Image: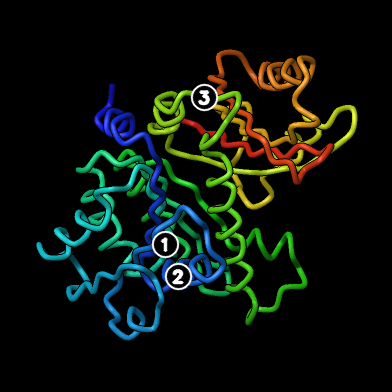
């Protein structure tokens, strides 16, 4: 059993830590902190002391060297994250911090065997081709550090929401990042009545290099299949082909009065089997009585390469 899973069984709890690295990551964390995720703690890292002071995040690390972390920075990072069982790193790529400091931050975290998902943003096209290419190169570097990575392509936001003005584009992006965090929180088996084992949840996701997350709500006779179909549209992710997916995790929320039926469970397996053979499927279900006859589905799908 992996070290982080052994630790999880000892503590019998899940602690979500969110780290914002650089200006884009900090702005995302500021919005998340303001809206609030009940189980999350927040940490921000940057070279700009003013940017750090203006944030209400729980913890802050001031990095004085733009090219590397100091030993004090590494000690701070380890102290702040040592109680985390799942850690989400948000960063806007394409700048010096994403290229120089983010890999070192990830490497420092990895030494503690914490399950980490990196949510990394590719710039809008109006920010310049050079910055986009630099961002893509930086993301590949992070993937080489054996972390699950979610690539969020900002330009796809403008394609999906063409009415968005440049001035509002970043707020739109941060709202989407908050929705991603919410979906991840909803996917965790906190109080499931049909539950994926914690070790299965972490093990199946840990070594995936590319993750996508989606959610969907539906009701009626085919509510499960329809909700999964909605969740799997992944409108803000490019380069996604479900035929290349290695692991498929589903969390289903339903009310106690309208629990899952056996034929609905069969729909889950039929859907995944239709993608391609040998996909590893894990799923959980929990109650949310606010849904009444509806179901809400969160899908996390990932590929090893």
Horizontal side of residue 41 vs 302, given as left or right: left
Assign a secondary structure to mark 3.
loop
Residue at image location 52% in from the left, 34% down from the top? 189
The foreground one among 278 and 140 is 278
The foreground one among 3 and 47 is 3
**Dot 1, crowdedness within 10 Å: few (<14), some or many (≥20)?**
many
Assign a secondary structure to mark 2.
helix
Image quadrant holding the N terminus, namely top left
- Which residue in the protein does label 3 denote? 196
Q: CA distance from mark 2 to mark 3?
A: 34 Å
Q: Earlier in the sequence, mark 3 or mark 1?
A: 1
- Which residue in the protein does label 1 denote? 91
Residue at image location 32% in from the left, 86% down from the top? 50
Q: Earlier in the sequence, mark 2 or mark 3?
A: 2
Do callouts 2 and 1 mark residues in contact (Cβ within 8 Å)? yes
Horizontal side of residue 255 vs 184, given as left or right: right
């Amino acid at each position: 059993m992996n070290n982080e899973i052994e630790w999880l069984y000892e503590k019998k709890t899940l602690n979500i830590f969110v780290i914002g690295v650089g200006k884009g990551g900090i702005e995302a964390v500021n919005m998340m902190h303001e809206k609030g995720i009940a189980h999350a703690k927040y940490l921000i890292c940057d070279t700009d002391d003013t940017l750090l002071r203006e944030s209400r995040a729980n913890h802050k690390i001031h990095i004085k060297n733009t090219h590397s972390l100091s030993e004090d920075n590494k000690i701070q990072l380890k102290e702040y994250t040592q109680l985390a069982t799942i850690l989400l790193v948000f960063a806007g790529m394409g700048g010096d911090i994403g290229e120089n400091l983010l890999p070192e931050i990830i490497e420092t975290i990895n030494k503690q065997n914490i399950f980490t998902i990196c949510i990394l943003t590719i710039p809008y096209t109006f920010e310049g081709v050079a910055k986009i290419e630099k961002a893509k190169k930086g993301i590949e570097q992070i993937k080489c550090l054996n972390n699950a990575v979610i690539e969020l392509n900002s330009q796809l936001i403008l394609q999906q929401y063409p009415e968005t003005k440049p001035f509002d584009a970043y707020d739109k992006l941060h709202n989407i990042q908050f929705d991603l965090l919410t979906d991840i929180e909803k996917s965790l088996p906190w109080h499931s009545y049909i539950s994926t084992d914690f070790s299965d949840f972490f093990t199946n996701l840990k070594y995936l290099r590319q993750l996508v997350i989606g959610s969907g709500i539906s009701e009626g006779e085919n509510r499960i299949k329809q909700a999964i179909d909605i969740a799997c549209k992944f409108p803000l992710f490019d380069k996604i082909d479900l035929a290349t997916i290695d692991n498929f995790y589903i969390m289903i929320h339903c009310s106690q009065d309208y629990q899952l039926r056996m034929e609905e469970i069969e729909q889950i397996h039929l859907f995944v089997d239709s993608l391609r053979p040998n996909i590893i499927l894990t799923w959980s279900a929990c109650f949310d009585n606010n849904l009444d006859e509806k179901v809400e589905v969160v899908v996390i799908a990932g590929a090893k390469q």
